[in-house]
Image (tube, grey):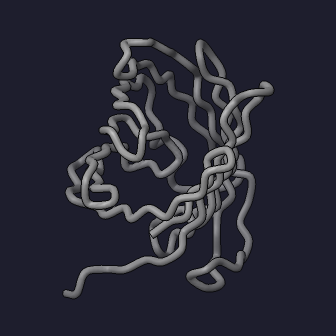
């Protein structure tokens, strides 16, 4: 479960991994919407359905986001993400991320060793910076913050509230 703040709106969302393929993860959000991402936890969702007033999004990506692994300070990747929303409005932007360091961070799921990754998105219809705190021991981001580069853009903060693994 994660807490998400978009602008002044705070929501609690439950994200469940529904399927993992060789290069994608499929998610069910709040039991009603499916989303799809790459296996790289720092790349924005490639497919989302409608949820809580958000629009459908369909994106394609060129470049290899997995070049950042194994995670080490200074490692990076760059991809170009293009797509359209439900209103068929298009956008294309360069998305670049780099590992800035490793440290311990306190979170709602305990104190964890984390990797800090900073990203920038710039291009048609998109301009922001992002900061991720990724905990390799649980395979998830415990914190995500997005800041718009221009006034009027949408800021977002996501924090991991809980993690639950299926019984084996």
x and y percent of residue 100 in the render?
74, 52
Q: Is residue 88 left or right of residue 32?
A: right
Q: Nearer the viewer, residue 53 or 99?
A: 53
Quadrant where the N terminus sits is bottom left
Residue at (64% x, 76% y) in the render: 113
Q: Is residue 123 left or right of residue 42?
A: right
x and y percent of residue 140 in the render?
48, 65
Quadrant where the C terminus sits is bottom left
Q: Nearer the viewer, residue 168 or 77?
A: 168
User: How many marks on residues?
Assistant: 0
Q: Is residue 150 left or right of residue 126?
A: right
x and y percent of residue 39 in the render?
37, 49
Quarter residue 86 falls in: top left
Q: Nearer the viewer, residue 14 or 43?
A: 14
Q: Is residue 72 left or right of residue 168?
A: right
Residue at (71% x, 37% y) in the render: 129
Residue at (47% x, 52% y) in the render: 41
Q: Is residue 80 above or below residue 159?
A: above
Residue at (26% x, 60% y) in the render: 31
Task: Specify the farthest residue to the right.
Answer: 151
x and y percent of residue 121 in the render?
64, 28
Q: Is residue 45 above or below residue 60?
A: below
């Amino acid at each position: 479960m994660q807490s998400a703040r978009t602008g002044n709106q705070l929501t609690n969302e439950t994200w469940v991994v529904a399927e993992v393929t060789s290069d994608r993860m499929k998610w069910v959000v709040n039991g009603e919407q499916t989303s799809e991402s790459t296996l790289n936890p720092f790349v924005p969702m490639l497919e989302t359905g409608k949820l809580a007033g958000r629009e459908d999004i369909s994106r394609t990506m060129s470049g290899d986001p997995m070049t950042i692994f194994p995670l080490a300070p200074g490692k990076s990747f760059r991809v170009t993400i293009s797509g359209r929303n439900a209103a068929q409005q298009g956008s294309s932007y360069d998305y670049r991320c780099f590992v800035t360091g490793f440290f311990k961070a306190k979170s709602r799921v305990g104190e964890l060793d984390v990797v800090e990754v900073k990203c920038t998105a710039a291009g048609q219809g998109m301009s922001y910076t992002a900061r991720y705190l990724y905990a390799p021991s649980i395979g998830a981001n415990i914190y995500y913050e997005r800041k718009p580069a221009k006034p009027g853009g949408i800021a977002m903060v996501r924090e991991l509230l809980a993690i639950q693994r299926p019984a084996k």
